[in-house]
Image (cartoon, rainbow, N blue to C red):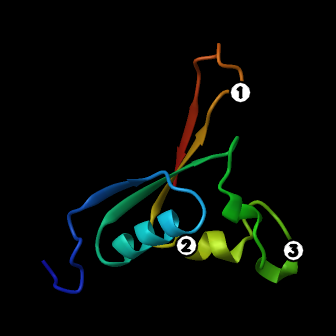
């Protein structure tokens, strides 16, 4: 184990929102942990709507805060059905 990557081998499932949770998970990833972030398109993290935005243009994937707090992580997008009677879900991994 590389002493600069003290969390190497640790696996983290990140479902946190706004600020401290995503930032803490990022620190774990920056130091060797494998962090997978779950994000919902139906109920997105509020950081996605926080300025500043790339090129000053607001948009779902343009927030500097969201990008900064979630770098070094793997991402998993979940599109959960709005109708509770519907059992299908769509997953995408990046």
- Is 58 left or right of 50, judged from the image as shown? right
Residue 82 is tagged as 1
Residue corresponding to mark 2: 69
Label 1 with label 3: CB-CB less than 8 Å: no
- Is 83 left or right of 2, judged from the image as shown? right
For this orientation, the residue located farthest to the front is 20
Residue corresponding to mark 3: 57
- Is 87 left or right of 60, judged from the image as shown? left
Residue 60 is tagged as none
For this orientation, the residue located farthest to the right is 57
Q: Where residue 76 sits: x, y (%)?
A: 51, 49
Q: CA distance from mark 1 to mark 3?
A: 29 Å
Q: Where residue 12 sits: x, y (%)?
A: 34, 56
Q: Where residue 74 sits: x, y (%)?
A: 45, 60
Considering the numbered disc 1 on the image, is that residue within a helix, a strand or a loop? loop
Q: Looking at the image, which residue is at 24% across and 71% down?
A: 7
Q: CA distance from mark 1 to mark 2?
A: 27 Å
């Amino acid at each position: 184990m590389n002493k600069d990557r003290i969390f190497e081998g640790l696996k983290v499932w990140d479902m946190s929102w706004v600020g401290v949770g995503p930032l803490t998970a990022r620190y774990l990833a920056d130091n060797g942990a494998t962090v997978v972030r779950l994000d919902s398109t139906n109920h997105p993290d509020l950081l996605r709507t926080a300025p500043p935005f790339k090129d000053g243009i607001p948009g779902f994937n343009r927030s500097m805060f969201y990008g900064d707090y979630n770098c070094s992580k793997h991402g998993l997008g979940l599109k959960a059905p709005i109708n509770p009677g519907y059992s299908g879900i769509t997953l995408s991994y990046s």
